[in-house]
């Protein structure tokens, strides 16, 4: 139940955790864009 727990107000906010989330989101978006590019390239520039 890790993903569905409520926010704990007494927990400290970590800058490092926020940076990690931004980097992960950027990596996922770039990966999806690269996959999309490869699919388009395969379909239209064969």
Image (cartoon, rainbow, N blue to C red):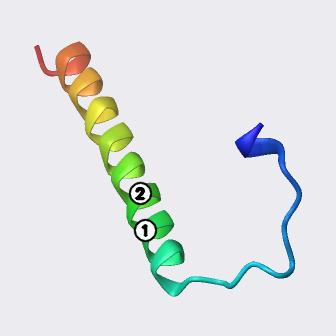
The residue under the point 41% across, 57% down is 24
Q: Nearer the viewer, residue 45 or 35?
A: 35
- Which residue position holds label 1? 20
The number of numbered badges drawn on the structure is 2
The CA distance from mark 2 to mark 1 is 6 Å
Place of residue 18 in the rendered image (x, y in percent of width and height, measured from the top left): 53, 75
Q: Nearer the viewer, residue 21 or 26?
A: 21
Secondary structure under badge 2?
Answer: helix
Place of residue 23 in the rendered image (x, y in percent of width and height, measured from the top left): 38, 65
Residue lying farthest left?
A: 46
Q: Tell me the quarter of the image containing the C terminus.
A: top left
Asked where in the image residue 16 lies, by quadrant, the reply is bottom left
- Which residue position holds label 2? 24
Horizontally, residue 32 falls left or right of residue 40, namely right
Q: Is residue 29 above or below residue 45?
A: below
Secondary structure under badge 1?
Answer: helix
Asked where in the image residue 20 lies, by quadrant, the reply is bottom left
Q: Tell me the quarter of the image containing the N terminus.
A: top right
Horizontally, residue 10 falls left or right of residue 23, namely right
Q: Is residue 40 above or below residue 37?
A: above
The residue under the point 37% across, 38% down is 32
Q: Nearer the viewer, residue 38 or 15?
A: 15
Q: Is residue 24 above or below residue 15?
A: above
Asked where in the image residue 38 lies, by quadrant, the reply is top left
Q: Is residue 40 above or below residue 2?
A: above
Q: Which mark is residue 2?
A: none
Horizontally, residue 17 falls left or right of residue 39, namely right
Mark 2 burial class by Cα count in 10 Å: few <14, some 14-19, many 20+: few
The residue under the point 73% across, 44% down is 3
Q: Are marks 2 and 1 in contact (CB under 8 Å)?
A: yes
């Amino acid at each position: 139940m890790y993903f569905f727990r409520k926010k704990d107000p007494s927990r400290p906010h970590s800058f490092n955790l926020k940076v990690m989330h931004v980097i992960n989101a950027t990596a996922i978006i770039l990966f999806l864009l690269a996959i999309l590019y490869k699919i388009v390239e395969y379909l239209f520039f064969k």
